[in-house]
Amino acid sequence: MIAIFKELIVSSGLVSLTGGNLIMWLVSFVLIYLAIKKQYEPLLLLPIAFGILVVNLPLTFLMEPEHGLIWFFYHYGIENDIIPPLIFLGLGAMIDFGPLIANPKTLLLGAGAQVGLYVTFFAAILFGFDLREAASIAIIGGADGPTTIYLTSKLAPQLLGATAVSAYAYMALVPIIQPPMMKLLTTDHERKIVMSKLRPVSRLQKICFPIISAMTIMLLVPASAPLISMLMMGNLFKESGVVERLTKASSNELMNIVTIFLGLSVGATMTATTFLNPKVLFIFFLGLFAFIISTASGLLMAKFMNLFLKDKINPLIGAAGVSAVPMAARCVHKVGSEANRRNYLLMHAMGPNVAGVIGTVVAAAILLKNLG
Amino acid sequence: MTDWSKVFEVFGSGIVGVYLVMLLLQILTQLSTRIIDMIESRNQSGDTAVKPPVTDDKGKV
Amino acid sequence: MPELLAPIAGNVWKILIAVGDKVELDDEVIILEALKMETPIYCDDSGTITEIRVKEGDAVNEGDVLAVIG
């Protein structure tokens, strides 16, 4: 009888627990709290947090190569680059490129914000990260979760958990991170600028845009193909108006399904041994730095464009050039309406916001081409 | 050790590349908008009964 | 007669006025919802509301008339 009891204890995970596991439980509990109570990107943070918890229960071998359940999700979904492009398919089926087509200049703002990403790349190297790790950290500044996961899983898979969590966490914190920089770099007068009404965009234009941009981007940067092809096909589904079932499947069912596997697998990469590493703190710090510098470079790009434009743009919309759709656009709208309550920048900010998604993918693809 | 020439190469080619792609996309978008505007205004001034005017939906995600 | 136009596309979230109400410049009259964000619309003129052209839940386009102020 006692022997059976002893056997149960010895074969349980309890004896194999390490201090690191306990710390990871705490990390997981904090993330679960943030997801449920504060609703910081709960759709992703909750499966990530639960993934962290279960993978830090000893002897479960959920991430054991060729055996563990979550390892299969991770291997087939993320290592083989299936899930991030599928998320992009859903994203494409939800995005409205209308404000971007109405004001194509905002494409340059989407490029402007990516400058911050390369500045961070530089900074990360000064901190002692190698080139591939530095690129994975820099992409956090693009504020695009799937792209961050896509690039990190190819260049520096050991950092995947940290870069993914910091990308999603900072996206949720956009309303706190961005406004100080926005106020610092713009004058009250500039924030008050009311932009002229966006021109109407016809259905034909909206149908042509994903086709033209898919061809242009993929011809110039073939490495962007997995993400851009899915994004633009999703958008073509939506704008064509004839395949509503496919649009809905991409943006609802399929997207929700892969989100579960994405979150769980990313969380499960965070075992105590890989995550509890001084490097991770630097990643969170550099990720925040990337976010702030991308915001700044977007704003400065908008101010620079204003030097040449007759019809001035409100420089605040440059801050929406970091992707984070639509959090960054909402944030711009809010700061704009604080300066002038008749200022409705939301739709104007959606242009650079969706341009930022394209810009981040292009930037990631170029990094991948140079370092992959 | 860190290969600084590679760092600068990645840095430079990245920034130039992103701007180039976005600029080209901007030009192509403007061009296609202009062409589509022309086609649509011709359709409208011609036989409106054959092709109903295209309505745009509300700019929402 | 001055018209109150929608400055942004979205759904009508709340209507804070009724026909016959007196409004002042800068009064908050209607709240629109776009991208899950509430956007208050302020009055451009003082006067009396003579007509409200939308109801709560309606989808409006940029430039649509929301109300008429007499």
Image (cartoon, coloured by chain):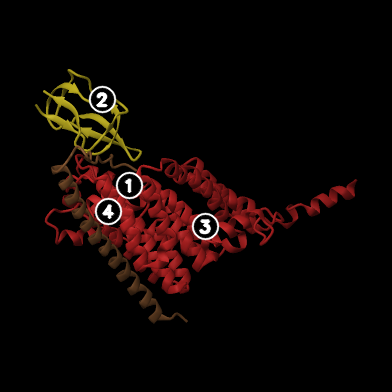
Chain colours: A red, B brown, C yellow
Instruction: Tell me the SS state at disc 4.
Output: helix
Residue A357 place in picture, x, y as percent: 36, 56
Q: Tell me the chain of label 1.
A: A
Residue closest to the eye, A7 or A357: A357
Q: Residues within 10 Å of mark 3 (few under 14, many from 20)?
A: some
Residue A96 is marked as 1
The outermost residue toward the top is C20
State which mark lies toward you, 2 or 1.
1
Q: CA gap, disc 4 to disc 3? A: 36 Å
State which mark lies toward you, 4 or 1.
1
Q: How many marks?
A: 4
Compared across the picture, whether A193 is left or right of A136 comes to left
| Residue type of the residue flagged with mark 2 | Leu
| Residue type of the residue flagged with mark 3 | Ile
Instruction: Tell me the SS state at disc 1.
Output: loop
Q: CA gap, disc 3 to disc 2? A: 49 Å
Query: In this rendering, do the residues under marks 3 and 2 share a single chain?
Result: no
Compared across the picture, whether C55 is left or right of A139 comes to left
Q: CA gap, disc 2 to disc 4? A: 32 Å
Q: Quadrant of the N terminus of chain A?
A: top right
Residue B35 place in picture, x, y as percent: 19, 54
Occupied quadrant, residue C50: top left
Q: Earlier in the sequence, mark 4 or mark 3?
A: 3
User: Cβ–Cβ below 8 Å for labels 2 and 4?
Assistant: no
Determine which residue is flagged by label 4.
A182
Residue closest to the eye, C24 or A47: A47
Residue A82 is marked as 3
Determine which residue is flagged by label 2.
C16
Q: Tell me the chain of label 2.
A: C
